[in-house]
Amino acid sequence: MLNTAELYSGKTDLAAITPLDTIFAEYRSKKDSIEKIAEFVSGNSAVMSYFFDGARVSRNTGSYSASTFFEVKHAIASLDAEYWARVMSMTDVLESMPASKRNEWNKQIREHETPEFLRDTVLSTMNDLLVKRQQFFAERVDGIFRTLSAEHVTNRPEGFMKRMIINRMMTYYQTVDHDTANYVHDLRSVIGTFMGREIPHSRSTDYAISHIYDSGDTGQWHSFDGGAWKIKLFKKGTAHIDIHSSMAYRLNQVLASMYPTAIPAKFKTQPKRFKEHDIKMDLLPFAVLDEIGHFRENGDDSITFYSTTISKQTERVLRYIGGENTWGSNWTFGYPVKDILQDIIRTGSLPEKKTHQFFQTPETLADRVVGIAEIGENHSVLEPSAGHGAICKFLPKERLTCIELAHFNCRVLQKKGYSPIQADFLQWESDLKFDRVILNPPYSKNRALDHLKKAHQYLANDGRLVAILPASMKEKEFFPDLTHEWSEVLSNEFRESGTGVNVVILTLYR
């Protein structure tokens, strides 16, 4: 595929930079074969009728004749459509088009209504489309605005607002209207351009919207691309979309460049305060998201990628969510993973390690601290920083209360069979007391001590708290009314998570 630098360098002579000679030669060869077969059949129509009648009886097919089934113009129309699609796929020009033009081209290809695949026609058409790529960006914004529902007062005729509503996301047959989904993809692409991101393929947006409907997750917000925008889909086919106010302003700037006298000044005024993106998420490249999306299920907890090789960054994502490469392109997770992968593809992000301080507890260390806790058959248990459940897996689910800050991590915990409470533990309040409290808290900015102090408030009489803490806290007495027991300093326990911090285990008795 041609890259952006080539497309904008002024090289618009497609024949000079793409292997079109091979394409045209293949096309001519197949067209010649079609015409020869059609000519042969037309000269032997009486004999061919026996083939059709035999198929009708033996295979229960419809009634056909040689003259209708082997009509040359229909076969060549199919051939033309196939080769136009191939040429379009050689550049990103189809993906760069506004939804209205992309929908029209897709319709022509799908219904075999493309122009005849002639060399001069192909070259002039593709060169013209390549030249118009920059113009397409403004047309995309205009198309998005024109497709907004006129019957909802949330949408304003003067310009984009932070909240917008689109109708006709569903067809009469209760399936996603792919043409309308293309306008949502245009919005996603424009916002991605404003953010300096590469543009995802339109099928990724269509697939994500379809998955929301198929999963029954209508009526609730779904975040995309690290929180840059979100969508709420309704069964009746309405879609509510929420974007940052700064994005609405930039969309209106594009509209104003097209219709300078039609957009009121207040819609062209930069907002005083720009809403910041969620700094607690890592945005993933669309190339990684595309790789993650190409898999087949082998069962609830196992998948196989269609590609025999995947990038190192994709591997890191899979290991982050508990994946293990068992053989070849097969990965096992130990829990139903499909919805988690779909969440990653849709949101385009993962909790950022530094701000979340998510360093998964190694299994041997998790097993050790749970053993120290000596959990009895009737003991209630609190785990205030559950992550992906490395410690939880050793705890009794039916008597466990686990808290987790990141929504994504809560989704993983749910798939593993837990019922997490999504909250910042330091802000969480409850009247409950627990017989056992086990935690591996975040360490940065003194949060380890803050979590320890908060956790000890929930310790019941005769209870026991076991915490994994930075080694620098060893031998300090934090609570005069409690007995403190310290383990030896443990080195390199978290090396698999990418940190060399030394830790120590503190046990508190009331």
Image: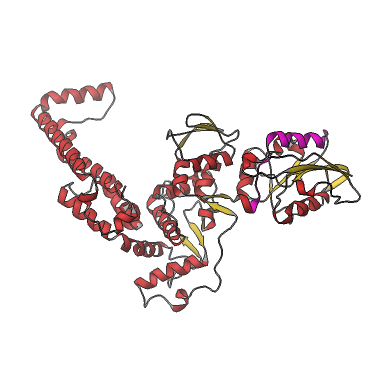
Whether the magenta-drawn stretch holds residue 289 is answered as no
User: How far from the left and from the top, in percent, is residue 211?
Assistant: 49, 45
User: How far from the left and from the top, in percent, is residue 256?
Assistant: 39, 73
User: How far from the left and from the top, in percent, is residue 376?
Assistant: 83, 34
Residue nearest the viewer, comparing 117 with 51: 117
Residue extending furthest right?
Answer: 481
Answer with left or right where residue 486 lies relative to residue 302.
Answer: right
Q: Residue at x 62, y 52 (%)?
A: 354
Q: Is residue 220 in view from this perspective?
A: no
Number of numbered markers: 0
The picture quadrant where one finds residue 388 is top right
435 versus 191 height, above or below: above
The picture quadrant where one finds residue 25 is top left
Q: Is residue 139 in view from this perspective?
A: yes
Q: Residue at x 12, y 23 (%)?
A: 47
Answer with left or right where residue 285 lies relative to residue 141.
Answer: right
Which range is magenta?
355-376
